[in-house]
Image (cartoon, rainbow, N blue to C red):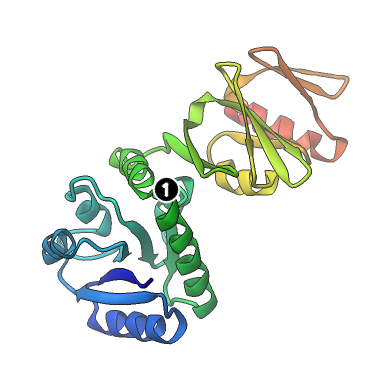
């Protein structure tokens, strides 16, 4: 089965390069439409009902994010294309949406397409897109993140996470409602995802939300609210205490 795909980019050259790469590297992709005017892309998407959309972020008159917010009930998978914009990339990654940094690398393109094909089969696109739009509206802070699990994705409030604990190659997340969730991704993945949002590595296996820290004990233990406590390693102690002083 081939995947109906639309390409949206205000630069004709970029559209041609991307279509050529997809034709050569991704035989599963069928480009059914391409457009260099974002204001026309909404109509094209609603008309052709694609399964996948490659969407440029920085376009005049209407950004890729603005375009996305104008589509009612988007049910397609998205792969964003962007020049390096750290805030945009952070917002995208928190919702487990694919992105490519321009100029597009061939290996990255193939990987993002493979991920998109899996997501299309799992039909998780609509929730991810709505979460992304909610995060990006205020343009100030991330509100929700998508947690990869063995069954798919769980969408949770960022401020509900007290801590993360690495267990082998997996991660257990603990929440303020006393529930926990096991993710199929490593603690390193969550560090990269959360480091800009008041989370700190106090130990190689423990990532804590600084908003929940209540006290640090000289015995090398940090106590958090809701009856949580975790060790602080000697190698990370100074950096951790420095972060606490800055945050509080």
> Which residue corresponds to the image point at 81% horizontal and 22% vertical from the top-left?
221
> Which residue corresponds to the image point at 37% horizontal and 66% vertical from the top-left?
81
Q: Residues within 10 Å of mark 1 (few under 14, many from 20)?
A: many
Q: Toward which corner of the image does residue 171 lie, by quadrant?
A: top right
Nearest the camera: 109 or 231?
109
**Rendered-image quadrant of the N terminus:** bottom left
Element at label 1: helix
Query: In the displayed structure, does residue 62 sit left or right of residue 82?
Result: left
Nearest the camera: 140 or 37?
37
Please state the horizontal and vertical placement of residue 68, each as a whole percent of the image.
Answer: 24, 53
Mark 1 lies on residue? 91
Q: Toward which corner of the image does residue 140 lie, by quadrant?
A: top left
Nearest the camera: 80 or 20?
20
- The total of numbered circles placed on residues is 1
In this picture, is 190 found above or below 59? above
**Rendered-image quadrant of the C terminus:** top right
Would you say residue 248 is visible in this rendering?
Answer: no
Please state the horizontal and vertical placement of residue 158, each as a whole percent of the image.
Answer: 49, 32
> Which residue corresponds to the image point at 26% horizontal and 63% vertical from the top-left?
50
Would you say residue 90 is visible in this rendering?
Answer: yes
Which residue sits furthest front?
1
Please state the horizontal and vertical placement of residue 26, each as a whole percent of the image.
Answer: 44, 78
Nearest the camera: 204 or 241?
204
Q: Toward which corner of the image does residue 225 lie, by quadrant?
A: top right
> Which residue corresponds to the image point at 84% horizontal and 34% vertical from the top-left?
233
Please state the horizontal and vertical placement of residue 35, each as a whole percent of the image.
Answer: 18, 73
In this picture, is 69 found above or below 27? above
């Amino acid at each position: 089965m081939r995947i109906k795909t639309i390409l949206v980019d205000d630069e004709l050259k970029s559209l041609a390069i991307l279509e050529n790469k997809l034709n050569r590297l991704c035989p599963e992709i069928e480009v059914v439409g391409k457009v260099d005017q974002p204001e026309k892309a909404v109509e094209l998407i609603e008309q052709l009902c694609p399964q996948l959309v490659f969407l440029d972020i920085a376009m005049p008159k209407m950004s890729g994010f603005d375009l996305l917010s104008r589509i009612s009930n988007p049910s397609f998978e998205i792969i964003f294309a962007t020049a390096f914009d750290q805030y945009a990339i952070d917002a995208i990654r928190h919702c487990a949406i694919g992105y490519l940094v321009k100029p597009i690398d061939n290996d990255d393109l193939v990987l993002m397409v493979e991920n998109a094909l899996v997501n299309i089969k799992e039909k998780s696109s609509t929730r991810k897109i709505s979460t992304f739009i909610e995060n990006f509206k205020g343009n100030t802070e991330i509100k929700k993140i998508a947690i990869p699990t063995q069954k798919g994705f769980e969408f949770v409030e960022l401020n509900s996470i007290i801590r993360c604990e690495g267990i082998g190659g997996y991660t257990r997340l603990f929440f303020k409602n006393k529930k926990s969730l096991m993710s199929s991704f490593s603690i390193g993945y969550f560090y990269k995802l959360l480091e800009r949002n008041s989370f700190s590595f106090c130990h190689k296996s423990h990532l804590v939300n600084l908003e929940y820290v209540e006290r640090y004990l000289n015995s090398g233990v940090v106590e958090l609210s809701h009856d949580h406590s975790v060790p602080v390693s000697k190698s990370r102690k100074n950096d951790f205490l420095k972060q606490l002083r800055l945050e509080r």
